[in-house]
Amino acid sequence: MRRRSALNLSLALLAAGFVVIVLLIPAGQEPEIPNRLDFDPNQDVRSIQVERVGKPRLAFVREAGGWLLRAPVVAPAHPHRIRDLLALPTLPASARLEINDDDLRRFGLNPPLATLSLDQDTFEFGITDGLDDRRYIRYQRQVHLVPDTLYPQLTQGANFFIDTRLLKEGLRPERISAPHRVVWLEGDVWRSDPAQATGEPPAAAIAPAWETAQALAVTSGTGADGGQRITLAFAQGITIEFDAVEQDEEVFLLRRDLNLRYQLDQDHAMALMVTPGVVAPVPVTP
């Protein structure tokens, strides 16, 4: 019983200590914000590189129209993935440790599991601390213990970082041609030839569906020629072509100029005027 009494006394003193800490914080005042990495992610970062153990290097560059994945494949980069990479320096650090070379192995940093470079600033990822799933990240001569929210993304393949949007933001089609139907904007009114059939989307709804459409998944590579051709024309003088194909009851849009394959479910395909089962082109000239 003495041992249990001593344990109860220790717990009571510990609880009392917590009460004292709370009382020392003035009413209405928040605790101090944890340290963050000494880096400003809002600067104009122009390039990003990710190196992972046993995986190909990822390379991104900023262009006028957004971020582009340059290696190991070339494709528009997913804006949310880029945002997460750039947000690393804003993660709260619960600890900041000065280290020497002998400490690197202890933190899993010799060699690092992954390296993220934002222009010339390099961040090395080590192991987690094993208690609350925070990860050791080395920046310059310090190791920071931060929430482990980014490392799982760094281990993904290149397809994970490809933009799932079918069209870049701001592109608004004014004419959409499919083998079985054409819709076009005339003044403020959308026309259709032939007229909308039962089960087909109205002409005015097709262009907005393309503007917001996102694929279930995107992969590099388009395969052999074929499929029904969908052509989108824009006021900017841009024309984009997709080939629609079916495989194992799945619908895919092939962007051959980008060598990308977008997977859709059939409901979204129908909203885009992609009709499963239509394979023979039908000449339509409004």
Image (spheres, grey):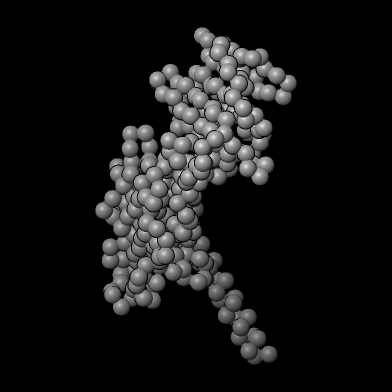
The residue closer to the viewer here, 20 or 186, is 186
Q: Is residue 22 above or below residue 231?
A: below
The residue furthest bottom is 2
Residue at the top extreme, as displayed: 187
Res. 89 in view: no
276 to the left or right of 48:
right
Quadrant that contains the C terminus: top right
Choose top left, top right, bottom left or bottom right for residue 269: top right
Residue 8: quadrant of the picture: bottom right
Q: Residue at x 36, y 46 (%)?
A: 70
Quarter in which the N terminus is drawn: bottom right
- Residue 80 point in image, percent of width and height: 46, 44
Which residue lies at the image location 63% right of the left edge and 33% below the top edge?
268
Residue drawn where x is 40% and y is 58% of the image: 56
Which percent across, then down, holds residue 100?
28, 74
Work out whether 283 lies above or below 250: above
**Number of marks in the rendered image:** 0
Give percent across and percent down for residue 178: 57, 24
The answer to whether 145 appears left or right of 179 in the picture is left
Q: Residue sitting at 30 percent across and 44 percent down?
A: 46
For this rendering, which residue is in front, 161 or 81?
161
Q: Position of residue 113 (x, y in %)?
A: 40, 66
